[in-house]
Amino acid sequence: MCKVIMLIGIPASGKSTWRNQYIKENPNTMVLSSDDLIEKLGATKNLTYNEAFKDKEIQKQARFIYKQLKNEAIADNKDIIIDKTNLTKKVRIENLKNIPETYSKHFVVTTTPRDIVDIRNKERYDKTGKFIPDWVINNMEKSFQYPDETEYDTIEEI
């Protein structure tokens, strides 16, 4: 049985770090990450992630490629990791749309303390130029809805 792993958490909480470790052990898993796509598309135009994130054409291209990759993974019966913030039930339902019922749903929720998130966000900016403003993270924290048991088959906190 195939599975979809949905990562849930605010920026810089460790979702992509967890994903990268998982992929080392499970290399045939398809990663769906809008951020990765935006970063790659931006790089083709010599844009930073933050610049690319504001580019409507890049956003449009990223959504298109994301859907293509999702469809390819399903057609090839691959496991899938959805690496987004996925903070609300509504967003999680939308991101799981078109995932066949034959896929099990495993949620990974990051519970990193905010002071650590702030340090990581600064370190990531220093290293890559990617930065999420504090007000954005604050709003994301406020909107977070912990998954309820109707949404997943298994759940783990990291």
Image (cartoon, rainbow, N blue to C red):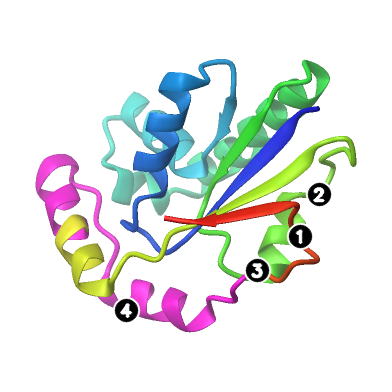
User: Label 2 is placed on what type of residue?
Assistant: Lys
Q: Are marks 1 and 2 in contact (CB under 8 Å)?
A: yes
| Cα distance in 3D space between marks 3 and 2 | 16 Å
Say which residue label 4 marks: 135
* In magenta segment, residue 87: no
What element does badge 3 sit on? loop
The reply to whether dot 4 and dot 1 touch (C-beta < 8 Å) is no
Q: Earlier in the sequence, mark 4 or mark 1?
A: 1
Residue at the spot of label 1: 93
Going from the N terminus, do you reach mark 3 or mark 2 first?
2
Residue highlighted by disc 3: 147
- The type of residue carrying mark 4 is Trp
Between disc 4 and disc 2, whose residue precedes? 2
Q: Which mark's residue is nearer the viewer, 4 or 3?
A: 3
- Closer mark to the observer between disc 3 and disc 2: 3
- Cα distance, mark 4 to mark 2? 29 Å
x, y percent for residue 98 = 85, 42
Q: Which residue is mark 2?
A: 97
Cα distance, mark 4 to mark 1?
25 Å
Q: Residue furthest right?
A: 101
Residue segment shown in magenta: 121-147
> Which of the two residues, 38 or 5, is positioned nearer the viewer here?
5
In primary-sequence order, the first of circles 4 and 3 is 4
Say which element carries label 4: helix
Pick the quarter of the image with the N terminus: top right
Position of the C terminus by quadrant = bottom left
In the picture, measured across the screen, residue 66 lies left or right of residue 48, that is: right
